[in-house]
Image (cartoon, grey):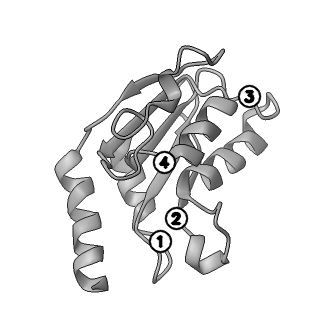
Amino acid sequence: MVRAALDAAGQTPAGDVPIGAVVFAADGTELARAANAREHLGDPTAHAEVLALRAAAQVHGDGWRLLECTLAVTVEPCTMCAGAAVAARVGRVVFGAWEPRSGAVGSLWDVVRDRRLTHRPEVRGGVLQSECAALLEEFFTGYR
């Protein structure tokens, strides 16, 4: 699943941080994929996860609820994206690279496993971590 997110990250518009996200149904069917497009769209909410969750909700068939779905991402979701995953009721979040500066799925915060929330998805981090981190390192090396 994270390989599919890496593939989605390859579609990131020039100038945007290469992050990809894919939402899968419980049976493994791909529902939607997206790449980060914040700069391209001039939209602070146009993170790959949010765009993929929006698109998946349109095709999933249960309105906005993505119960039993998996959100696969190349990097640990930020607070906004972790909150969106909880709000969408995804069953599982799987990601590649950890993000110690802004990660909200275990690094800096742990939004998705906060016991005060009524929904807490399963989490698996560090999947294909080296490949996902290399994608970001390459971008930021060229950016600076």
Task: Give the CA distance from mark 3 to mark 4.
Answer: 20 Å
Mark 4: which amino acid? Cys
Identify the mark nearer the N-term, 2 or 4.
2
Q: Nearer the viewer, mark 3 or mark 4?
A: 4
Mark 4 vs 1: CB contact within 8 A: no
Mark 1: which amino acid? Thr
Mark 1 vs 2: CB contact within 8 A: yes
Residue placed most toward the observer, 111 or 5: 111
According to the picture, the residue beneath numbered tag 4 turns out to be 78
Task: Give the CA distance from mark 4 to mark 1.
Answer: 18 Å
Q: Position of residue 50 (x, y in %)?
A: 62, 51
According to the picture, the residue beneath numbered tag 2 turns out to be 36
Mark 1 secondary-structure assignment: loop
Q: Position of residue 101 (x, y in %)?
A: 34, 53
Mark 2 secondary-structure assignment: loop
Circle 2: is it few (<14), some (14-19), or many (20+) Cα within 10 Å?
Answer: many
Mark 2: which amino acid? Asn
Mark 3 secondary-structure assignment: loop
The image quadrant of residue 65 is top right
According to the picture, the residue beneath numbered tag 3 turns out to be 65
Residue pictured at 39% horizontal, 45% vertical: 76
Marking on residue 137? none
Q: Position of residue 33 (x, y in %)?
A: 55, 53
Task: Give the CA distance from mark 3 to mark 1.
Answer: 26 Å
For the C terminus, the image quarter is bottom left
Mark 2 vs 4: CB contact within 8 A: no
Residue placed most toward the observer, 27 or 54: 54
